[in-house]
Amino acid sequence: MAYEDGGGDPQPLFQALGQPITTKPDVMRHPEKHGYLVVFGTGKYLGVTDFSDTSLNTIYGIWDYGDDTDNSEYLGFFNRGSTTNKLSNQPGTVTLLAQEIVPSPDTDPNFPFFWTVTVNNEDLKLRILTNNSPDWETVDDEAGQLPNPAVHAGWYFDLPLTAERVVTDVMIRDAKAIVISFTPEDEPCSIGGDSIVHEMDAASGGRLLAAQFDIDADAAIDSEDLIDIGEASKVAPTGIQKTGRLHVPAILGMGSTEMKYFSSSEGTIKRVREKPPRLGVRHWRELE
């Protein structure tokens, strides 16, 4: 969605400086406030030079809080290194909430980005994110609302692997963002590389509160699919790694679970069993 700077010049809602956006975002209504959350990832995989590109890429959830009568309420560009205005068209206290990797103690100290679980003699590499909570406090303006000072206008997660990027369209289902990141091999003729299928809270970018993946491969998704991260804490994994470049999945409902089928650059189909979305009537209102 585009806005104007007050002088009639169109301005983008948000700019990720130096980070290309080459895939389609998805949008949902804000869970608490007026407006929408726009979820997308950055990255490019279109030409030979992209194979060796090691630039930082990011998954974003951006709050479009603007109203129809004030075209100056765009966020501007994001400068995470700034000590004043991290969002160029916002007060210095308004920023984006950061989510980060929960590092694994079981891997090489120089590569702490995965938790490894062995199931049926196969090592599963899992990614676990923090679950920091956004502050959506607002103040009223003449036509709607504005982020209150010292609060968030969205969230972001910096992809930690060298050359990791998002080159597949994002999908939101049941307020969960399905985001596939891809780390290619640096050989142009290779079909290799790895993908990570993320299921994250679309409102915060953090990990989900309940298990989403069938980690132990028992065709049920329950507390046995949580990962012990120490200090008596068992949490839901946010991502699961698969080989090859994966594309937007086809989804088959299977009662209490669903299967996502991903075509892969390896010429195979990758499967991930997950928790299905909640469907049906959730509330109603009696009309007089």
Image (tube, rainbow, N blue to C red):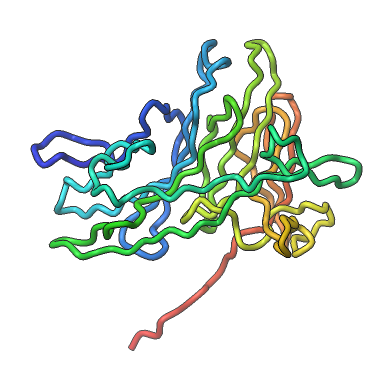
Looking at this rendering, what residue extends furthest in the left direction? 7
Locate residue 35: give its quadrant: bottom left
Picture quarter with the N terminus:
top left
Picture quarter with the C terminus:
bottom left
In the image: residue 98, left or right of residue 131? left
For the residue pair 166 and 96, the one nearer the viewer reads as 96
Residue at image coords 11%, 42%: 6
In the image: residue 23, left or right of residue 74? right
122 in relation to 142, above or below: above
Residue at image coords 39%, 26%: 18
Q: Position of residue 254 (x, y in %)?
A: 73, 57
Looking at this rendering, what residue extends furthest in the right direction? 121
Is residue 26 in view? no
Looking at this rendering, what residue extends furthest in the bottom direction? 288
In the image: residue 44, left or right of residue 239? left
Q: How many marks?
A: 0
Residue at image coords 43%, 47%: 61
Q: Position of residue 149 (x, y in %)?
A: 27, 57
Is residue 107 in view? yes
Q: Position of residue 264 (x, y in %)?
A: 69, 29
Residue at image coords 78%, 43%: 106
For the residue pair 264 and 51, the one nearer the viewer reads as 51
Q: Position of residue 19 (x, y in %)?
A: 42, 28
122 in relation to 282, above or below: above
149 in relation to 62, above or below: below
Locate residue 272: give its quadrant: top right
